[in-house]
Image (cartoon, coloured by chain):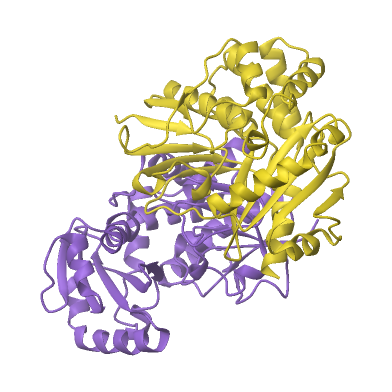
Chain colours: A purple, B yellow
């Protein structure tokens, strides 16, 4: 038996941290030797969640190879979102709810993806299938991941499976889903204390589209105006970071979690791909996308289609 | 509800045909509208299986797009092994037991892979999970696919799950596993009636390795000498086909299913990758690989490693 590390994507959100903890716990119950780790520090929301259920944050690692030869991925599969030395290790398991891209293995593996709102929903199903009990604290974490990814079931990525899992997990955790959910989401929108650099990094992911590196960051808020009061500083931070990291096109999604609308701020080229993707003109590098809250379902596929057209 | 096609890989073997029929049946029971089709005619073994259990061969198709917008893949995921217009359709479901490579989607999907010996074993598990009964004839087909892929459990790809599924399916189908299995495998080794072109095509798959197109074909036999009596004609057929199709390196695996040994015949370049992969010299373009029966587990990963080293 060789130990394996289990981790979610870079710039971890609540699901990336929680799904790693939950899947590692499940695998250990099934007889494997695994440790949940993270590719970054927990964000504000995740810190709130971990504190609420009195659970430690996973150890942060940069590379896998010094410790292990095999790893399990949760909540991601794309190479550029994964650990730095992903190509040097064997991926034995993946549990995910994203598209598959920039992912390849030399040998067969266990891969479980479902088009649901949250990885923790899929892992909840695996606990059921294996007849393994979920401890109350872990149930609270998994519930939080589902609330986070689905914005309390308002995101179009939400499925009946997510709602069923969340209801069951809330019961196991002993919390009121609605009131806890809103409290948790608001804890994640405390933006005033963050620098522009933090805002454009905390929940950002890179995508390779038509040979361009496209970066998409999402900031949740309860007040769009509060964020756009800092527009000039955000623009400067994005321009500097894009230059340093080689991003061609940067999309900042500022999402109002109360009314489920997003305002995009776009820096870099080709901007016309964004206009094509959403069939709408950018005005001063911005556009409003009513009803848009999901990067995965309402931004990335549309951009991908525009680049491939 | 839009209809979807379900199919296995090009040059279909028994699992590719059977898994499509089984998964389509399951999906239809779950309320989807699907049709199992095939990317080629059934081989000798599969014809024997379909006749034995009195089941029709799936309709053969070349393209998906004229009929449907979405498809489900079984027993493969790599683009070059799939339907010609795979890039024009949406892949909604994959059930597979191979490595993942040359596969990407624009949106999340259902993907269920396990490192077991046969796709039909995974689908058997899905029938169980959904509580759907497997009709006797379909059970016979799924049993046959497991026997075919695991060479009656002699292949190193065989797992305990394959054996458990096969035992249960044999009971449902009302056949004796051992005696039926040997009869079925022998039905697939009737090589005398086949042309060299047929022998090097029937169970061949293409792989992209280090920028080279590598073709690996497998012929099962109960008598190696019978096949190598035709070596010169096989060489000519491989050379002609490689030129016509653009294969850089062609490996013909001739596998004795009675003693589980393989003799390789290698045409094209770079031959040194084959020597590196198996740490053995080619003699006159040939090498014996005792105990080797699995392309997926004992040939492709080793070649891949040699190309990537």
Task: State the residue in front, B146 or B160.
Answer: B146
Instruction: Look at 78% across and 17% down and name the residue there.
Output: B183
Please name the residue shown 36% across and 38% down the image.
B70
Q: Residue at x 71, y 17 (%)?
A: B170
Identify which residue, B34 or A131, lies in the foreground. B34
The percent coordinates of residue A71 (x first, y second) are 65, 61
Q: Splitting the image into 4 quarters, where does residue A237 fall?
A: bottom left
Quadrant of the image for the N terminus of chain B? top left
Q: Position of residue A35 (x, y in %)?
A: 67, 62
Quadrant of the rendered structure where residue A288 is? bottom left
Q: Position of residue A259 (x, y in %)?
A: 19, 58
Name the foreground residue: A182 vs A10. A10
**Which quarter of the image is occupied by the C terminus of chain B?**
bottom right
Q: Quadrant of residue B200?
A: top right
Report the side of B52 relative to B79 (left or right): right
In the picture provided, is A278 more to the left or to the right than B232? left
Is B191 left, or right, of A289 in this rendering?
right
Point 38% across, 24% down: residue: B31
Can you say whether A92 is above or below B132 in the image? Answer: below
As displayed, is residue A266 above or below residue B298?
Answer: below
Instruction: Tell me, yes or no, if residue A109 can be seen here.
Output: no
Is A161 located above or below residue B187 in the figure? below
Picture mark count: 0
> Can see residue A141?
yes
Q: Position of residue B58 (x, y in %)?
A: 49, 22
């Amino acid at each position: 038996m060789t130990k394996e590390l289990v981790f979610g994507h870079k710039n971890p959100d609540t699901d990336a941290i929680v799904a790693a903890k939950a899947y590692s716990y499940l695998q250990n119950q099934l007889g494997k030797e695994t440790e949940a780790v993270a590719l970054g520090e927990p964000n504000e929301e995740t810190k709130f969640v971990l504190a609420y259920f009195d659970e430690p944050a996973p150890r942060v690692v940069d590379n896998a190879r010094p410790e292990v030869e095999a790893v399990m991925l949760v909540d991601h599969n794309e190479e550029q979102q994964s650990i730095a030395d992903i190509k040097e290790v064997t991926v034995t398991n993946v549990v995910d709810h994203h598209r598959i891209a920039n992912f390849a293995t030399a040998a067969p593996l266990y891969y479980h993806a479902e088009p649901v709102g949250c990885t923790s929903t899929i892992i909840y199903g695996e606990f059921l299938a294996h007849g393994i009990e979920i401890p109350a604290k872990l149930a609270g974490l998994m519930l939080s991941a589902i609330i986070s990814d689905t914005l309390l079931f308002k995101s179009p990525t939400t499925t009946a499976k997510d709602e069923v899992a969340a209801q069951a997990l809330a019961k196991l955790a002993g919390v009121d889903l609605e009131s806890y959910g809103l409290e948790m989401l608001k804890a994640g929108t405390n933006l005033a204390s963050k620098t522009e650099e933090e805002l454009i990094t905390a929940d950002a992911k890179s995508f390779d589209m038509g040979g361009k590196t496209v970066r998409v960051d999402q900031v949740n808020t309860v007040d769009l105006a509060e964020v756009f009061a800092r527009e000039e500083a955000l623009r400067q931070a994005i321009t500097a970071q894009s230059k340093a990291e080689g991003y061609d096109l940067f999309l900042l999604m500022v999402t109002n979690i109360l009314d489920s609308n997003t305002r995009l701020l776009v820096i870099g080229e080709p901007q016309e791909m964004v206009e094509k993707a959403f069939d709408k003109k950018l005005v001063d590098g911005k556009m409003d996308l009513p009803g848009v809250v999901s990067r995965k379902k309402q931004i990335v596929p549309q951009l991908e289609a525009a680049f491939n057209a």
